[in-house]
Image: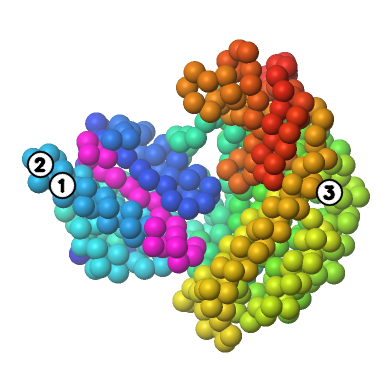
Amino acid sequence: MIKSDSGSECKLDMKGLRLAAISLGCSKNRIDTEEILGYLSTKGCILTNDYRSADLIIVNTCSFIETAQQEAVSTLLDLTDLAAAVKEAGGKKPKIVAAGCLVEVFGDDIIKDMPAVDGAIGVHSYSRLDYFVDQVFRGQQEVIKNDPPHEYRALSSRLLTSPVHSVNVKIAEGCSNRCHYCLIPAIRGPYRSRDPEEIIAEINDLLDRGSREINLIAQDTTAYGHDRENYPDLAGLIEAIMERNSYFRLRIMYTYPSRIDDRLIELIAKEPRICNYLDIPLQHCNDHVLKKMGRLYNRKNLEELIQKLRNQIPDLALRTTLMVGYPGETSAYFNDMLSFIEEYPFESLGAFTYSKQGGTIAGNAEHQVSRRVSNKRYRELMSKQQRIARQLNEKLAGKQLTVLVEGTLRPGSNWHYGRAEFQAPEVDGVVYFRSPVNLQPGSWVSVKIKAISSYNLLAGNPSLLEVNNN
């Protein structure tokens, strides 16, 4: 195996190379995958969904929690088995490579433990894809792991792997929060804000291509600009984005509670194109657990923030993520979490059980909670949230909502589904409705809610809305 420290000229002609990719993990990972595909397509690669006919298959891996690592390894093993079967059947064996977060965590061990994998490249090394692919096709099991660059810039224009009408845009890379349970700083490096001009140019390009909804994402969107003296903060960035004179929806994801300031709140309240929606991953609500997690706030801070948000932004929908089973979480601390979401209910709530990670402070902590107890708490939390969400959704019955059409339940069906501004893609519910005419994804419709559940809504026939998309 060759491990390189510097790039060299790529001699491989990639024109006509059949390329397939699998993206695992979060939406930020998917953006990386789309940039890789965009970049390699400019080199002449032809994209395919047929793994058996591919020359190269890239698996962009996730390593955030144990189950994500297991999924990544399982996917790589399945693909190497497939490649071997293709060769045995007389076909051309595709090259299988690992990319992304798993490479940053395990490095050379990926090739050592899975010798059928043809190479591995980490998240900070995509600028060397030409060299990497060249080495892979020379039969060198290259492992490339570079240090995080000082600046975060996009590798290439993205080749979208999801519909254009709703698109995530990454405004920063890395994280400097250093939460005690999290590997992200070790994997992705310190927080680096992306050039605001590059962000705005990408968004304008996406809107020109037909995007109707832009979702701003990062490990912590509210930290945007704090690392660069000449960059605006998040509110300033959004103000610049909103100079675009057309109708679209902007949604803010992954906000850190103690960094949501008055200026951002006022901007959300006054700008109708910004969704009355905030994603605020709290992780926990008990002061003792929050301190052990390394989170920079307490329960009182959260109460004051939620009250301020509810008071200043009409019809605000809040989403959060909570963790159960953190080391040292007692039954009393868990019950504090349950009482908190009763007193300060969230329209949407996701949860996950703590996953012990080597290399983190929490990984060496005492009083680890058993998986059985963690799973029980998870079920109890989500059961309570299901009831809370249904109660909140009951207030929507009879209301008229503007919905972004996503598609039909099946080809040829007159049953459509879409999302209101309080429903983020992939993580929240949807609105179902029947239409006498076929509606294209990306259309805006007005619907009246007829029935509700804990997560999804049922509406009557839609009215098509005309909006200025220029």
Nearest to the observer: residue 259 or residue 350? 350
Q: Residue at x 26, y 43 (%)?
A: 56
Crowding at mark 3 (Cα within 10 Å: few <14, some 14-19, many 20+): some
Q: Position of residue 58 (x, y in %)?
A: 33, 47
Q: Which residue is mark 2?
A: 89
Q: How many marks?
A: 3
- Precedes in sequence: disc 3 or disc 2: 2
- Precedes in sequence: disc 3 or disc 1: 1
Task: Give the residue type at disc 2.
Answer: Ala
Query: What is the C-alpha distance between the residues marked 1 and 2?
Result: 6 Å
Q: Residue at x 27, y 53 (%)?
A: 78
Residue 52, magenta (yes or no): yes
Quadrant placement of the N terminus: bottom left
Query: What is the C-alpha distance between the residues marked 3 and 2?
Result: 61 Å
Q: Which residue is mark 1?
A: 85
Position of 407 with respect to 144 (left or right) is: right
Q: Which residues are magenta?
A: 51-71
Which quadrant of the structure image shows residue 63?
bottom left
Q: Residue at x 35, y 50 (%)?
A: 59
Q: Position of residue 466 (x, y in %)?
A: 72, 16
Task: Give the residue type at disc 1.
Answer: Ala
Crowding at mark 1 (Cα within 10 Å: few <14, some 14-19, many 20+): some
Task: Give the residue type at disc 3.
Answer: Ile
Q: Which mark is residue 265?
A: 3
Position of 60 with respect to 76 (left or right) is: right
In the picture shown, does residue 294 fall above or below 87?
below
